[in-house]
Image (tube, coloured by chain):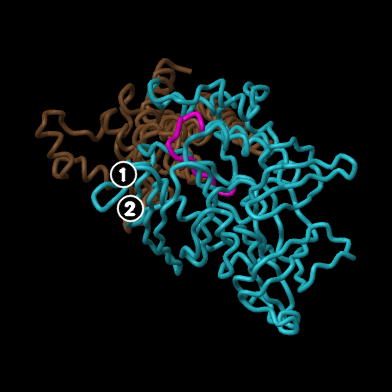
Chain colours: A cyan, B brown
Amino acid sequence: MNSGIYAKFDTSFDDFSLQVELSLPGQGISALFGHSGSGKTTVLRCMAGLQKARGELIVNGECWQNDRIQLPVHQRPLAYVFQEASLFSHLSVRANLEYGYKRIAASERKIEFEQAVAWLGVAPLLARHPDKLSGGERQRVAIARALLTSPRLLLMDEPLSALDQKSRREIMPYLEQLHEHLSIPVIYVTHAADEVARLADHLVVMDNGRISASGPLTETLARLDLPVHQYDEAGVVIDATVTDIDHHWHLVQLSFDGGVLWAKDPGAKPGQRLRARVLARDISVAHQHHQDTSILNVMPATIVGIADSNHPAAKLIKAQVGQTPFLAQLTAKSVSLMGLDIGAQVWLQVKSVAVID
Amino acid sequence: MTDIDWQTIWLTVKLATLTTIILLILATPLAWWLTRTTHWSKQIVASIVALPLVLPPTVLGFYLLILMGPTGPIGEFTEAIGIGLLPFTFTGLVIASILYSLPFAVQPLHNAFESLGERPLEVAATLRASPLDRFLTIVMPMARPGFVTAAILVFAHTIGEFGVVLMIGGNIPGETKVLSVAIYDHVETLEFAQAHWLAGGMLLFSFTVLLLVYMVNGRAHRSRHQ
């Protein structure tokens, strides 16, 4: 296995123990998701070597740590973006950016200074002092500074969580762009489901120092046994293509493997690839196809799983439309009265589809 | 003021300058070790470093005199390598001053290092900086106010020392006679005019030094919170 990341860590401190074994894709964004205290930041720090742990780390064929080798932090070709931007307060923005850039051999530089500056839009800030930047600007500089070491692995520890809503919205497009620019793997720690839906290709869910699920995003989000669903955020993310645009009603038709959904037009072009998020609480289930409903999106589906939810009154239903799984949150009473069971053919009524753009 | 007074002032400044330079070099790694270590001996070392703060200077001077004297281990050593005995020499005075002012160098540096926190060093490590590189490019510049404070305090404290000097250096003009001792001598011989000159000068000097320290710290504090 030459491509991909293999990580295995075993450590404990205070009364917390961490035991993880992970195989992650060698490119794209892998989200490490879980609530605070689940150990996701610790996994990231172990990968960086900032936290000592027994274990193994192989990144695209290179061993950074095993029983015999333990590369110190500064010898691991990675970059780390911390929760708070942590710019060096005694250096200008330019000197901050150059700090890592100057410390790698010219032949190792795959990302040029001007390139990173342009990607993160920090050109107007170069002469300034970190104290004079807004939170969002600071984090953009920190990301550019990290990229300028031309890392072979980018670790991001909740880079948006210390920012206000406005700064988060401002920085998100830059992160999405990085996805296109970078061919290196990114591991992105977060506890925000919307960031996962937006950015991740691969999802790892952590709970109490253990991995509770790891797999491709759409597949993993649709699993019924995830602690993620405790957060009232249960739902799936669908990769779709824009196949029709209804200019009169400002709607777009999104085609996915197994069906179509109509959503509010975000200004999309035909043929564009989009992601859409459908929350479990926005789907209801019917035995018949009702024509007299305000709901636009009604699709035939097969129930493939039923699980308890975080409240005794609610159940989580997994139903497949073609090859694509959806989750629906229903009351336990409805499930019982309707006699829903695995294998039942039903109609899913989707009240709301959020296009992620 | 007499020539002897000028000679005394010059000797005092030379002693203080040398002590400051040597002490900053010695105290930097010591303070850094105290900041980073989790070793069990940390508290013991920290206490030893702080001892001169609470010990009467005469006690410190007394032990140094014994240690560096002809029957003390240091004295035997310095005689064996041909330097001779250190008490009542300028070198002996420098050594005594270094020990006497040690906490005034270590503590401001220790505080400055502690207030940096772990994060800037972790960031620098992920940006490929080796431990020495991190110390030189992150710790030293960020802890600059600590270095300035340490240097000023050590210099001023050395200028003002009296008890240790008398115990270890005595009163040899041009070799070990420093300002504070000279003032004492002037008063003893009822030369109040000269005592006034030197004492007034010391007062003004000390005030200026403290004002400088407060101004430097105040500025560093402000710039951190802007």
Give the residue drawn at x 32%, y 59%: B40
- Decide which of A199, B195 is in the foreground and name it: A199
Task: Decide which of B136, B91 is in the foreground and name it.
Answer: B136
Q: Specify whether residue B168 is painted magenta.
A: no
Q: Secondary structure at mark 1?
A: strand
Have a look at marks 2 and 1 and say if they share a chain. yes
Q: Is residue B114 visible?
A: yes
Which image quarter: residue B84? Answer: top left
Question: Would you say the residues marked 2 and 1 are in contact, meaning their CB atoms lie under 8 Å apart?
Answer: yes
Q: Quadrant of residue A119?
A: top right
Residue receiving disc 1: A63
Residue A28 screen position, x and y as percent = 51, 42
Q: Residue furthest left?
A: B80
Mark 2 residue type:
Glu
Q: Position of residue A204 (x, y in %)?
A: 51, 57
Q: Residue at x 15, y 34 (%)?
A: B78
Which residue type carries mark 1? Cys
Q: Which residue is mark 2?
A: A56
Query: Residue at the location (79% across, 44% down)?
Result: A252
Residue depicted at x 45% and y 47%: A25
Foreground residue among A333 and B127: A333
What are the residue bounds of the magenta stretch?
A147-158
**Where does the image place residue B200, in percent across and percent down from the top left?**
57, 28
